[in-house]
Amino acid sequence: MTRPLLLALCLTCASLTLVASTTEVAYAEDSSTKAAKKLFDKGQKQFNLRKFESALELFQKAFDTKPLPGILFMIGQTHRNLGDNEAAIFSFKRYLKLAPDAENRDQVEDLIAVLEDEIEQAKAVNLNVEEDPGPTEKPIVSTEPDPIREVPPGQSSSPIYKKWWFWTSVAVVAAGVGAGVYFATKTDAMMAPPTDLGVIEAP
């Protein structure tokens, strides 16, 4: 059993004794005390059944009927079981204010310190979560083809060697060069080399 839980159980028993003794003394004084005692007993049953929301409602009604310090302490205990440490601390401090000479004052102050420490720890955890940037998002890679680049007027987007007119010009030039070589060699062949026998012209 943890220290805060053991401390809370001891304080609960002490508060029940305080409420019982207070209401017994005041029983004969007024009807509001009787009504508060009845509401408190109902709230205590709900608290023991761990029905803390119902218990809190009954304890608050009992305190509104008769503001007895012991009832206020149980309101703090119920807030603590509901996880509302700030409301529990508020109720415990009010309890000590209404009962400055309470026999369990030291234990209540210890419980307040424990709850305040839990609040600070929770704030530190939340701060660390907010500062954590989380996983870095991967850049989105586009699967779309590159857009067609615009070609300035008078220019073509295809290389020159893919143009039909380029290869036509090459063919014409090649044909001209070939013809020139052919006729040059043909003429040389038709002209016999000079000899002492004279020149014979080709028919």
Image: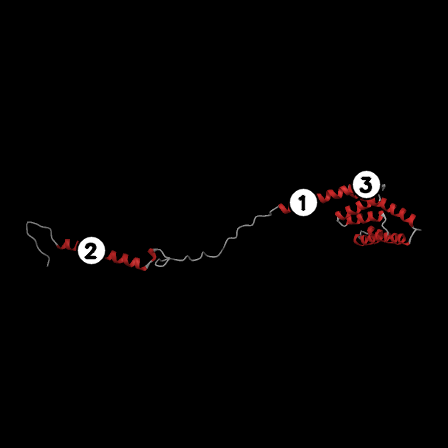
The numbered mark at residue 107 is 3
* Picture quadrant of residue 98: top right
How many residues crowd mark 3 within 10 Å: few (<14), some (14–19), many (20+)? some
Q: Earlier in the sequence, mark 2 or mark 3?
A: 3
Which residue corresponds to the image point at 64% horizontal and 46% vertical from the top-left? 129
- SS at mark 1 in the image: helix
Amino acid of disc 2: Gly
Q: Where residue 39 appears, x then y in whole percent?
A: 86, 54
Q: Quadrant of the N terminus?
A: top right
Q: Which residue is mark 1?
A: 125
Local packing at callout 1 (Cα closer than 10 Å; few below 14, some 14-19, many 20+) is: few
Q: Which residue is mark 2?
A: 180
Q: Residue furthest top?
A: 106
Determine the CA span between mark 1 and mark 2: 93 Å
Residue at 20% of width from left, 55% of height from top?
180
What is the x, y in percent for residue 133? 60, 47
